[in-house]
Image (spheres, grey):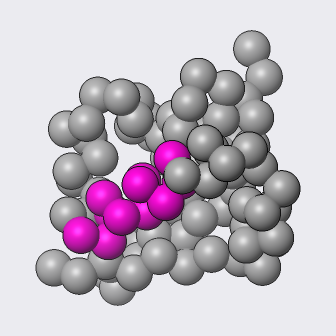
């Protein structure tokens, strides 16, 4: 099954302002999704794949580093991952 990743213009612009190691982590995450699918993210413990709750109940997140996460929504009907944002997670 081939997956498609849709990124907003906001994501494309904001990725350029992130530190290089976070950009590289995002590209690695993106590669895993495109080549192996969403289920493979669950098997890689370092990503800490999580379904979110509350206002983000339709979203998931994966860690790109200790401080940064990628937030996304999955549409399995058309096998698409919509990347919503990459930001520094506040602890």
Segment colored magenta: 25-35
In the figure, residue 22 lies in which quadrant?
top right
- In the image, taking residue 68 as reference, residue 46 lies left or right, namely left
Residue at the image point whose x is 67% and y is 26% from the top: 67
From this viewpoint, which residue is outermost toward the left?
1
Q: Examine the structure image and report whether residue 87 is included in the region drawn in magenta.
A: no
- In the image, taking residue 5 as reference, residue 22 lies left or right, namely right
Residue at the image point whose x is 36% and y is 64% from the top: 31
Question: Could you say where residue 21 lies in the image, as x and y percent from the top left?
Answer: 61, 42
Q: Examine the structure image and report whether residue 27 is included in the region drawn in magenta.
A: yes
What is the quadrant of the N terminus in the image? bottom left
Residue at the image point whose x is 73% and y is 67% from the top: 11
- In this rendering, does residue 53 appear at all? no
From this viewpoint, which residue is outermost toward the top?
91
Question: Could you say where residue 24 lies in the image, as x and y percent from the top left?
Answer: 54, 52
- In the image, residue 47 sits, relative to residue 27, either above or below, namely above
What is the quadrant of the C terminus in the image? top right
- In the image, residue 81 sits, relative to residue 45, either above or below, namely below
- In the image, residue 78 sits, relative to residue 28, either above or below, namely below
Question: Could you say where residue 85 lies in the image, as x and y percent from the top left?
Answer: 70, 56
- In the image, taking residue 24 as reference, residue 68 lies left or right, namely right
In the figure, residue 52 lies in which quadrant?
top right
- In this rendering, does residue 50 appear at all? yes
Question: Could you say where residue 74 lies in the image, as x and y percent from the top left?
Answer: 43, 65
> Which secondary structure is most common in the magenta stretch?
helix
Report the number of numbered marks: 0
């Amino acid at each position: 099954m081939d997956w498609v990743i849709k990124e907003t213009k906001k994501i494309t612009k904001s990725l350029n302002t992130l530190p290089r190691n976070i950009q590289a982590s995002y590209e690695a995450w993106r590669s895993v999704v495109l080549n192996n699918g969403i289920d493979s993210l669950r098997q890689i413990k370092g990503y800490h794949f999580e379904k979110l709750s509350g206002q983000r109940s339709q979203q998931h997140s994966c860690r790109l580093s200790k401080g940064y996460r990628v937030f996304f929504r999955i549409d399995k009907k058309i096998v698409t991952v919509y990347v919503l944002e990459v930001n520094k997670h506040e602890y």
